[in-house]
Amino acid sequence: MTAPSQEKQSASKNTSITAKNANIATEDTNIATNKNDNKPAEQPSSSFPLLDRFLGYFQAVLERSPLTIREYRYDLTLFFRWLKTRRGLVAKDIKFKEIPLADVSIELIRSVDLTDLYEYMTWLSRERKLQPATRARKVSSLRSFFHFLQTKDQLLTENVVNALELPRQVKRLPRYLNVEESRQLLNAAASATYEYAERDYCILTLFLNCGLRLAELCSINIRSIRDEKMTVIGKGRKERTVYLNGACLNALDAYLAVRPRTAKTDPEALFISRLGRRISPKTVQYLIKHYITQAGLDPKRYSTHKLRHTAATLMYQHGQVDIRALQQILGHVSIATTEIYTHIDDRRLHQAVESNPLAAERLSRPPADTDEANIEEQN
C-alpha cells in the first residue's frame, strides 16, 4: 500500500471515529433532556389515596430510592387496572393504560382472593409474556402493599398475598467479560477523542474494578472520595466503603483534570453530563452499550450490570478474594447472593479436586503369584 493511500485510509478512520464520538455527545444531550428514563410518568388518575400513603411511607420512612418507588407504583397500578377489568368495572372502549384508579377502595382490595391472584399470574405469563423473575417482583410488590394495609393502616385482617407462591426461577450463572475482553472495552474508551472521553474511561474503570451498581455510580459525589477510598450508597440506603486501586485513582485524576467546573445543578456530582447535570442512568447505559459495540463485543449479551459481574468474577478468580470479603465489596446483604460467583470458576473446581490429599494415590498391584498366574493361564 502506498503512503498516500495509507494516509487516506487513516484519515477516513479518524473521521469515522470523530463522527461516532459526535454521536455519543448528541445522544448524551438527548438522554439528559429526557426525564422519562424507563417508564412513562403515571398520571394522577393512575393513583388512589391508599397507594399514595403506601408509597409515601416507603419513601419517607423506609427511604427507598426513587427508582424503587417508581417500580412499586408501576407494579401496583398494573394489578389494579387488571383487577378492575376482571370485575367488569371498566368501559369497553377505554385503553388498558388509561384505566383510572382514583375509585379503588378498601372494599375492592378486601375482595381480592387467592383465585384472583392465580388468574393475575396466569395473565402476566400468557398475555404480558413476563419472565419468572419479573412476575416474582410483581408478587413482592403486592405482598408489601397488602402488608402495609394490614400492619400500618390496619385496614386488613390478613394478607392474602402471603399464600401466593413466588414463580420458580431458573438460576443462571452471570455473564461476564474475561480479562482480554475487559481490556478491549477499556481500550475502546481510551481511543475516544471527544471532550468527555476521560469521563467515560473513568466510568468504565470504576465499573470493572469496583463492581459498582449503576445507581451507585451515578450517585457518587466528589466529596465521597477521600485518599484511596470512596463512599457509595447502595440498596436500602446502606453506605459502604469501596477501596480504589491504582487504575481507579489514575482514571479519576485524568477525569477530574478536565471535569466541568460550572455544573448547572448538583455541583457535588462526580460525573457530569453535557448539560452540566448529574449524569443519568440512561446516559451511562447508552455509553456502555456504545463502547461494548466499539470493542467488537455483543451489546445484546453484555450490559451495564454485566460489568459488575465482571468485576466480581475477576476479583474472585485472580485476586484470591475470600467470599465474605467479596460480599462486603459488592454490598450484598446475603452471602447466598455472592456465592453464585463461586460456581463460575471451573479452574478452582479443578484445583479443589486436585488438592484432595488422596489425589496422589495410585493403584499398585504386587507381582502376581506363580500358582495364581498358572491358574489364570489354564482358564
Image: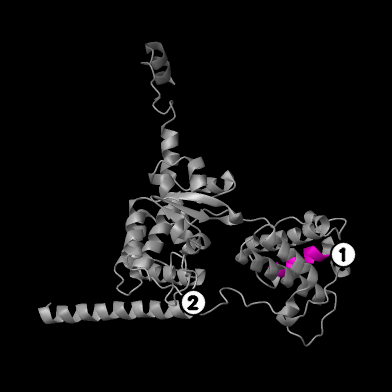
In terms of secondary structure, where does tag 1 sit? helix
Q: Is residue 123 magenta?
A: yes
Q: Which residue is mark 2?
A: 32
- Is disc 2 in contact with disc 1, using a CB cutoff of under 8 Å? no
Against 255, residue 353 (above or below) is: above
Q: In this view of the protein, can residue 177 be seen by the observer?
A: no
Which colouring convention does the figure follow? one colour
Circle count: 2
Q: Residue at x 56, y 74 (%)?
A: 37
- Magenta segment, prevailing SS (helix, strand or loop): helix
Against 353, residue 35 (above or below) is: below
Against 325, residue 364 (above or below) is: above
Q: Which residue is mark 1?
A: 110
First along the sequence among labels 2 and 1: 2
Q: Is residue 16 left or right of residue 220?
A: left
The amino acid type of the residue labelled 1 equals: Arg
Against 379, residue 206 (above or below) is: below
Chain part drawn in magenta: 116-125
In this rendered view, identify the residue nearer to me: 61 or 135.
61
Q: Residue at x 41, y 50 (%)?
A: 314
In terms of secondary structure, where does tag 2 sit? helix
The picture places residue 17, in percent across and down from the top left corner, at 30, 77
Quadrant of the drawing holding the N terminus: bottom left
Quadrant of the drawing holding the C terminus: top left
In this rendered view, identify the residue nearer to me: 267 or 83.
267
The picture places residue 106, in percent across and down from the top left corner, at 86, 67
The picture places residue 248, in percent across and down from the top left corner, at 36, 55
Q: Residue at x 43, y 26 (%)?
A: 357
The picture places residue 304, in percent across and down from the top left corner, at 47, 64
Q: Quadrant of residue 197?
A: bottom left
